[in-house]
Image (cartoon, coloured by chain):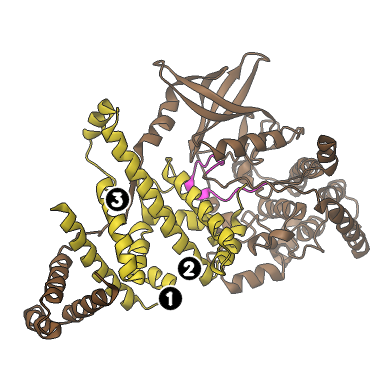
């Protein structure tokens, strides 16, 4: 049974207040919605079947929260949950894409190879996820900034609103985290 | 690396960024105070920072595979035991095909869903509930299940489907723009829809997303609710209002807009009916012009209905204006308490009889409602049909709104099953 949109803000609020069950439900709800849209045409998708996280997350936000007179808090809660959900979706998708390539779908792969790759590189997504886990231990807020900017496609201002800090802090966090991640991923490349 | 170490490097990195490039090297050397490891960390951060393209574009999802199936639907020749005759609509997570059933022989609108797992469960449960509805103004649901879609080249895949009554017609939104409707036409249309909604309410189904785009008007001018939780929005000329915020929120009762879940009941549908009536008369949505649902706008919406305005009274005439005003009352208590009460007043408007919608009857109705509600509360089952993404066939993505359906199962039936 899915909670309906009006419920989502309630779930999000309860989740923030420490209700694990509500937090899980809210996550599942947002995750399902994002995945459903990501899995099909129409909506935020471009004709070639790709879609940017920004469009995806905002489409789901508009559907689930906006028509519901969202407060700043609702936005905040939604975006942090959505960013995590998007990250999961990206990882699942990347894993699937890789296993397809490794697995029996040889003919398929040659088909798709004819076209230029349009989405994010699955290998990079997985490596980024691993590196982000490390960054979370080193600097949690910076890792959140990356999650919100890269996986949810939020703007600097939106990230600042979500995290409750200044855009300047977000910029700096982003730049530092990005440099660190780049360095970290560069190491694994070698 | 440990946190303190990272913080140190990050600080020096940040400060170095603030300095002009030529000064950076000496600044870093000073700041690191002979700590070579720290220095090399900061330097590698700066080198990486130069790669501006890294993570520059947010994550981009590529799932062209899912699209394949929906595109290939054009070449579908059969879905289970249905023969495909054409495509009615396509979009969102689903497509609607025109198909033929052999036995009994009839045309059906076949709605296909491309989601697995929960979506098909939702669909089946929903179809079961909707199967109980039998009303000339509600598109019938014949059957739901999972079937093999066969393409013209023999290829096939599996999809969940709902087979529904096929209604030839245009959406109420399009109907209203193509025809001049007088007050009587509007009242008559509303009366039919109110009958259908009343029928659903009696069977414990609350629609909650009634709007002109999910009501089809057939060639004889009869309206049919096609979107009872199966979310079919016809494609083609979707009016621009439908995609605006006003086009979405105008049919939502204030308690829905406020997210007061426990207050949303059959009266939310009455509100939607009133809002539809308002739009048919006024030629614009109830909350036309609203672009943001900020506090000021919400305060206005909760304060009074636009149908209470003098301009609208002049357009609708005193009688119909009063009825629509009461249907769109922000206050639940002052709104019509049932579809039949609303229908009764519409009949009076059509017959030119005086309304007797006085306060006393409202109070009586409220008391009745409260009693009935209390009794039913224990047996109410709420099924939330997922929004557009899962069930609605959203042909214009912009017009996608949340679909929600409350099924208040009859307590008798539950009791009977358990007994």
Question: Helix, strand, or loop for circle 2?
Answer: helix
Question: Helix, strand, or loop for circle 1?
Answer: loop
**Of discs 1 and 3, which sits in the foreground?**
3
Of residues B158 and B165, which is closer to you in this image? B158
Of residues B397 and A77, which is closer to you in this image? A77
- In the image, the segment drawn in magenta is B390-405
| Looking at the image, residue B148 lies above or below residue B16 | above
Quarter of image, res B255: bottom right
Q: Which residue is mark 2?
A: A76
What shade has chain A been given? yellow
Q: Main secondary structure of the magenta part?
A: loop
Subunit that carries the residue with mark 2? A
Where residue B127 appears, as percent x and y from the top left, is 66, 34
Q: Which residue is mark 3?
A: A126
In magenta segment, residue B391: yes
Distance (Cα) linking label 1 and label 3: 28 Å
Chain letter for the brown part: B
């Amino acid at each position: 049974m899915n909670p309906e949109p009006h419920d989502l803000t309630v779930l999000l609020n309860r989740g923030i207040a420490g209700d694990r069950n509500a937090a899980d439900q809210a996550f599942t709800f947002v995750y399902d919605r994002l995945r459903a849209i990501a899995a099909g045409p129409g909506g935020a998708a471009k004709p070639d079947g790709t879609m940017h996280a920004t469009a995806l997350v905002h489409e789901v936000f508009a559907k689930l929260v906006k028509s519901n007179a969202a407060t700043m808090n609702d936005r905040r809660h939604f975006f942090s949950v959505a960013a995590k959900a998007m990250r999961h979706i990206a990882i699942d998708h990347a894993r699937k894409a890789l296993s397809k390539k490794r697995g029996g779908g040889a003919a398929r792969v040659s088909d798709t190879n004819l076209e230029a790759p349009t989405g994010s590189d699955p290998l990079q997504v997985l490596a980024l996820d691993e590196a982000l886990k490390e960054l979370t231990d080193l600097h949690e807020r910076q890792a959140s900034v990356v999650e919100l900017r890269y996986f949810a496609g939020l703007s600097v201002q939106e990230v600042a609103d979500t995290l409750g800090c200044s855009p300047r802090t977000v910029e700096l966090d982003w730049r530092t985290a990005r440099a660190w991640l780049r360095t970290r991923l560069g190491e694994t490349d070698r | 690396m440990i946190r303190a170490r990272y913080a140190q490097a990050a600080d020096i990195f940040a400060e170095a960024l603030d300095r002009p490039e030529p000064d950076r090297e000496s600044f870093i050397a000073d700041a690191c105070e002979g700590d070579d490891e720290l220095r090399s960390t900061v330097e590698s951060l700066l080198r990486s920072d130069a790669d501006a393209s890294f993570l520059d574009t947010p994550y981009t999802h590529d799932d062209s595979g899912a699209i394949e199936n929906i595109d290939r639907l054009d070449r579908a020749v059969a879905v289970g035991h249905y023969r495909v005759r054409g495509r009615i609509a396509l979009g969102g997570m689903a497509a609607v095909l025109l198909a033929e059933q052999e036995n009994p022989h009839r045309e059906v609108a076949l709605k296909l869903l491309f989601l697995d797992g929960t979506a098909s469960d939702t669909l089946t449960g929903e179809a079961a509930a909707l199967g109980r509805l039998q009303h000339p103004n509600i598109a019938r649901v014949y059957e739901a299940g999972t079937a093999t879609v066969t393409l013209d080249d023999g290829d096939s895949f599996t999809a969940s489907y709902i087979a529904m009554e096929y209604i030839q017609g245009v959406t109420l939104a399009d109907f209203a723009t193509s025809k001049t409707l007088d007050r009587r036409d509007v009242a008559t249309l509303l009366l039919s829809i109110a009958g259908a909604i009343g029928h659903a309410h009696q069977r414990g189904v609350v629609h909650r997303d009634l709007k002109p785009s999910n009501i089809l008007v057939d060639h004889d001018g009869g309206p049919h609710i096609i979107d009872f939780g199966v979310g079919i929005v016809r494609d083609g000329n979707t009016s621009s209002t439908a995609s605006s915020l006003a086009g979405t929120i105008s049919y939502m009762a204030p308690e829905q807009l406020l997210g007061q879940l426990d207050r949303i009941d059959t009266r939310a549908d009455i509100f939607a009916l009133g809002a539809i009536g308002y739009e048919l008369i006024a030629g614009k949505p109830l909350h036309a012009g609203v672009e943001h649902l900020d506090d000021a706008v919400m305060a206005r919406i909760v304060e009074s209905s636009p149908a209470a305005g003098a301009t609208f009274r002049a357009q609708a005439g005193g009688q119909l204006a009063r009825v629509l005003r009461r249907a769109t009352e922000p206050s639940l208590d002052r709104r019509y308490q049932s579809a039949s009460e609303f229908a009764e007043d519409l009949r009076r408007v059509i017959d030119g009889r005086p309304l007797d919608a006085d306060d006393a009857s409202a109070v009586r109705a409220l008391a009745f409602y409260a009693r009935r509600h209390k009794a039913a509360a224990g047996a109410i089952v709420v099924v939330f049909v997922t929004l557009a993404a899962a069930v609605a066939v959203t042909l214009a993505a912009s017009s996608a709104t949340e679909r929600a359906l409350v099924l208040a199962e009859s307590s008798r039936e539950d009791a009977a099953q358990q007994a």
